Image (cartoon, rainbow, N blue to C red):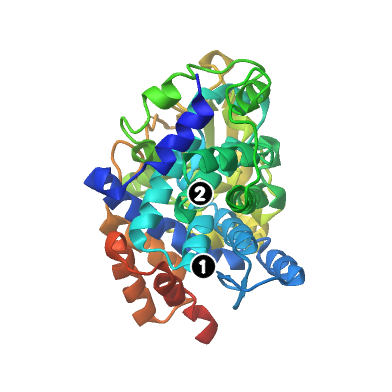
Amino acid sequence: MEISQGIGERVAGTRIEELPQAAIDYSATLAMSALGAMVSGHRCTGGPETIRYVKRQGGVPEATVLGGGFKASVELAGLANGTFAHATEYEDDSFPEAVSSYTLFPPIFALAEHLRSPGSRVIEAFVAGYEAQARIGLACREARRIGYMVLSLAGSIGVAAAAAKLLGLNAKQTTHAISIAASQGGGIGYQTGTTAHILEMGFSARNGITAAFMAAEGMTGQLDVLEAPRGLMNMITGGKVEAPEKILEDWGNPYRIFEIGIKSYPCCYHLQRIIEATFELKRERGLRPEDIRNVDVEVNAFFPTVVQHPEPRTEIESQFSLPHSVAIAMIEDDVLPSGFSRKSIEDERFRSFRPKVKTIVREDWGWAPTGWTPRITYTLATGEVIVREPKAAKGQPPALLGFDECIPKYRGCVDDLLPLEHVQRSIEMLRNLRNLPDTSALVAEVSAIHNK
């Protein structure tokens, strides 16, 4: 099968006129979610370091480094804004392919700003790029078991496809961009809880844009780089590629963006439903932290390979900490970025609650990111035992959030950074993204932080 070339043909052939309206609408919602994180992420761990690094590189000012107050090359702006977006841990993901919309939007917005692309091209690039990375992710689920961070690895290819679409490359050039990106793809799941983890999304942005620019200049790669016996998919799965024929057979039927869930809380995806279940119980019973004797959370063997920091030492580790996340849900009124701050980590209320929460790994439940349900057993101080088994959190498929439902998440990221009129104008531009004449106008609205 000519999978690599087939993806190139489908990406190059994507036209907004042929996309379902639901895909266009949901793309705008996801764009708003990602843009909010891009604007606010420079305040997170790794933000100042990333800004200093990008400034040090110099180069032609082509695209805005949000929160930095300056422009850099498209590649470096993509790296910075991708890192910022990931640093918030608000990224919206789809499973079981384990890829993210936040991998794509930072480089798409950077390149679209530089090219002054209309919003319709942004949507085309996003839908096509996401389909590419998601279909590869589905075929290469074994890679995640081995230890790859697939959102970064397949994401480099998704970014290359999206950038090729924005640049107007033909099918063969797009395939070369994908091939060049395959040589740069990487990502290690073990890095969760470190700044290397948040950088991986920035690297995908930089690498994918670079691949598309190099293909546009005439650089080439193997045209069967994905499916060849010694190609990428066989390499990262140890030869255990799943139904590779479905990459092309199922393309757009339906589009995988409809499997993207929007996060409500700025922490690991796999903590979302546990936090929500804890909030619901607290509200139902009027519970206080002192009313909880202990919380036992039964999970499958996959869970602790990602949520691996029971006693967090840093802000990022706390975003991958089950005890800390449950503590926030019991102690605070909402789970906000401040709950994962060093101040909260060291707060005696959190320090005393975290030991109450235990992870119980059920090896007999198998190893998979999805398709299983945690069992949470709350034992109250009175001795009463309450069990919850949350199937999914708000905003997860098939119950997707609409545009207006996602506005509070966006405003929670930008309201304290942007003047109100800029927030309002950016929301309306995003709502009508398909008809936006020039994406650089939208980026200008969310760059107003530097003049506030």
Q: Is residue 336 above or below residue 352?
A: below
**Nearest to N terminus: mark 1 or mark 2:** 1
Task: Decide if residue 191 is on the left or right side of residue 391.
Answer: right
Question: Dot 2: few (<14), some (14–19), or many (≥20) neighbours within 10 Å?
Answer: many
Q: For the residue labelled by badge 1, is the local secondary structure a helix, a strand or a loop?
A: helix
Residue 372 visible, this angle: no
Determine the residue located farthest toward the left in the rendered image: 21
Identify the residue under disc 2.
Answer: 164
Residue under the image location 63 percent in, 58 percent down = 79
Label 2 is placed on what type of residue? Ala
Residue placed furthest toward the top: 364
Q: Of the numbered discs in the image, which one, if any, rests on residue 186?
A: none
Q: Position of residue 177 (x, y in %)?
A: 58, 43
Q: CA distance from mark 1 to mark 2?
A: 14 Å
Given residues 407 and 137, the one toward you in this image is 137
> SS for tag 2?
helix
Which residue is the site of mark 1? 114
The quarter of the picture where residue 301 lies is top right
Residue plotted at (37% across, 30% down): 251
Residue 48 image position (x, y, % from top left): 69, 69
Q: How many numbered callouts?
A: 2
